[in-house]
Image: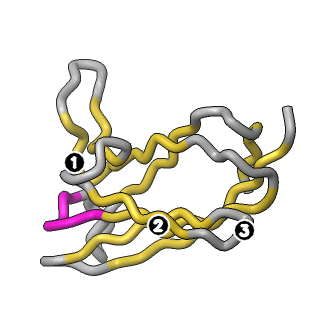
Amino acid sequence: MSTFYVNSTIEIEGKIRRRDGTLFNPTGVRVTVTTPAGVSTTYVWGVDSALQQAEDSNNDPITGVFVLTYTPSQVGTYTYVFESYGDYAAKVKNIFQVERA
């Protein structure tokens, strides 16, 4: 589990892979973050600027790698779910901890 400080901007990365392990871009990607208070917010790739496809050093998109830029405002345990949908559906859930600086 990763630990961050409250009100620090963080990047949460998700990789979308086929069953054979190759990275690919699905039709859609969304990330739902749930705060320690139980409030959930969903970010959608192509709609919300906080969720972007990762880029390499030449600013070219990296296939299958997505990054959510997020600023946790509460101390406690957060959950997040990276989800692909459309032509390929998959979900991965994870947690991170936020502490006072």
- Give the residue at mark 3: 37
Give the x, y percent position of residue 68: 43, 47
- Give the residue at mark 2: 32
- Give the residue at mark 1: 63
Query: Going from the N terminus, do you reach mark 1 or mark 3 first?
Result: 3
Q: Are marks 2 and 3 in contact (CB under 8 Å)?
A: no
Q: Residue at x 74, y 40 (%)?
A: 6
Q: Is residue 28 magenta?
A: yes
Q: Nearer the viewer, mark 1 or mark 3?
A: 3
The amino acid beneath tag 3 is: Ala
Give the x, y percent position of residue 25: 18, 58
Between 11 and 63, the one lying in front of the other is 11
Which quadrant holds residue 50? top left
Between 81 and 50, the one lying in front of the other is 50
Give the x, y percent position of residue 34: 59, 67
Vertically, is 99 above or below 20? above
Quadrant holding the N terminus: bottom right
Q: Which residues make up the magenta segment?
A: 24-29
Query: Going from the N terminus, do you reach mark 2 or mark 3 first?
Result: 2
The amino acid beneath tag 1 is: Thr
